[in-house]
């Protein structure tokens, strides 16, 4: 997101992006998303991976812009701040950028549906009562559900763009909020509860204590990034923090615990928001 904002600043200065060299291309799912978005802004993208960056053909292209590495971005944009509680307010520059990006990518949003995205490999959300993936319950209430792991970046955008409420567990998929209607509200299922030590203490590391048991440490909760992003984009953010976690022996990071949610509580919150939206003229 911050990289895109940096490009927006340059676009605003009437810079043209014909060629861009990407750094730190890691082939993470979120990287594919990033590159997909960038491909709408820049004509030609190149990777800085040694296998491709020094290819004789690529070498002849002018290096007009270089993307910052995530580490540099963290310093440049005070990224560490983004993970902590802030007093951010709406950022018109960022709001204009997301509007421009949607036009550029032919994304036209409505508020016709409620969407939920589950995760396959970590922070997967289950129904507390049935222990089944929570979408099995949510779908009965007309909430459209999917896994982004099954979708291309364009399919992800198509899935969320008509949301009036977008529900997800904490994770990079939430960045897709930039492709929702300005009135779309975000429900983030957080992993704030039972957040003890970060980095892990010896007792937790050696599994003397399960991740869900207290070691007495109170490390600050580090995942305020989407709460802050909603503040910057002027979106309503709702946090579901009253959760439990599965006891998975293979899970070694508190961050990755699979989440158990009371689906009737969640559905109640969702329809309360819908009711308020109906009376709101924004
Ligand atoms: Zn601990």
Image (cartoon, rainbow, N blue to C red):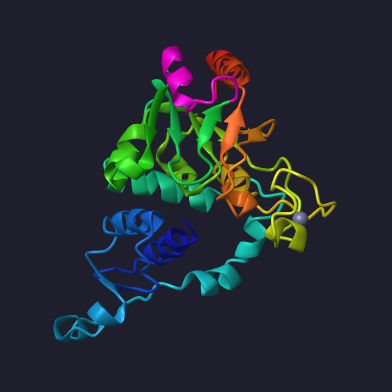
Q: Nearer the viewer, residue 281 or 277?
A: 277
Image height check: is 38 above or below 53? above
In the rendered structure, the answer to whether residue 280 lies left or right of residue 146 reads right
Q: How many marks?
A: 0
Task: Give residue 167's position: percent from left, percent from top.
Answer: 51, 31
Image height check: is 225 above or below 15? above
Q: Residue at x 69, y 60 (%)?
A: 205
Q: Residue at x 35, y 53 (%)?
A: 33
Q: Nearer the viewer, residue 150 or 251?
A: 251
In the rendered structure, the answer to whether residue 273 lies left or right of residue 109 reads right
Image height check: is 174 above or below 263? below
The answer, for residue 27, to whether it is visible in the render is yes
Q: Quadrant of ligand 1?
A: bottom right
Q: Nearer the viewer, residue 52 or 176?
A: 52
Q: Quadrant of residue 142?
A: top left
Task: Give residue 232's position: percent from left, percent from top.
Answer: 58, 47
Q: Which residues are magenta?
A: 128-142
Task: Give residue 4's position: percent from left, percent from top.
Answer: 42, 59
Quarter of the rendering occupied by the C terminus: top right
The answer, for residue 108, to whether it is visible in the render is no
Q: Nearer the viewer, residue 121 or 146?
A: 121
| Magenta-colored stretch includes residue 212 | no
Q: Quadrant of residue 234?
A: top right
| Magenta-colored stretch includes residue 130 | yes
């Amino acid at each position: 997101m911050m990289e895109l904002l940096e490009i927006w600043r340059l676009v605003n200065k009437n810079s043209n992006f014909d060629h861009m060299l990407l750094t730190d291309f890691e082939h993470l799912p979120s990287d594919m998303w990033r590159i997909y978005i960038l491909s709408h802004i820049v004509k030609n993208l190149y990777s800085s991976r040694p296998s491709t960056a020094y290819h004789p053909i690529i070498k002849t292209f002018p290096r007009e812009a270089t993307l910052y590495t995530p580490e540099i971005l963290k310093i440049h944009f005070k990224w560490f701040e983004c993970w902590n509680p802030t007093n951010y307010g709406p950022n018109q520059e960022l709001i204009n950028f997301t509007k421009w990006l949607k036009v550029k990518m032919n994304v036209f949003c409505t508020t016709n549906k409620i969407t939920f995205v589950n995760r396959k490999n970590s922070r997967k959300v289950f129904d507390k009562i049935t222990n089944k993936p929570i979408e099995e319950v949510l779908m009965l209430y007309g909430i459209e559900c999917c896994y982004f792991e099954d979708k291309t970046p364009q399919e992800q955008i198509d899935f969320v763009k008509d949301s009036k409420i977008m529900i997800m567990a904490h994770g990079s998929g939430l960045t897709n909020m930039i492709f929702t209607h300005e009135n779309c509200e975000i429900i983030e299922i957080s992993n704030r509860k039972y957040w003890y030590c970060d980095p892990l203490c010896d007792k937790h590391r050696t599994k003397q204590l399960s991740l869900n048991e207290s070691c007495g440490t109170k490390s600050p909760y580090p995942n305020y990034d989407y709460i802050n992003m909603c503040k910057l984009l002027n979106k309503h953010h709702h946090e579901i923090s009253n959760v439990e976690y599965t006891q998975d022996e293979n899970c070694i990071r508190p961050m990755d615990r699979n989440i158990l949610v009371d689906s009737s509580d969640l559905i109640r919150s969702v329809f309360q928001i819908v009711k308020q939206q109906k009376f709101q003229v924004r």
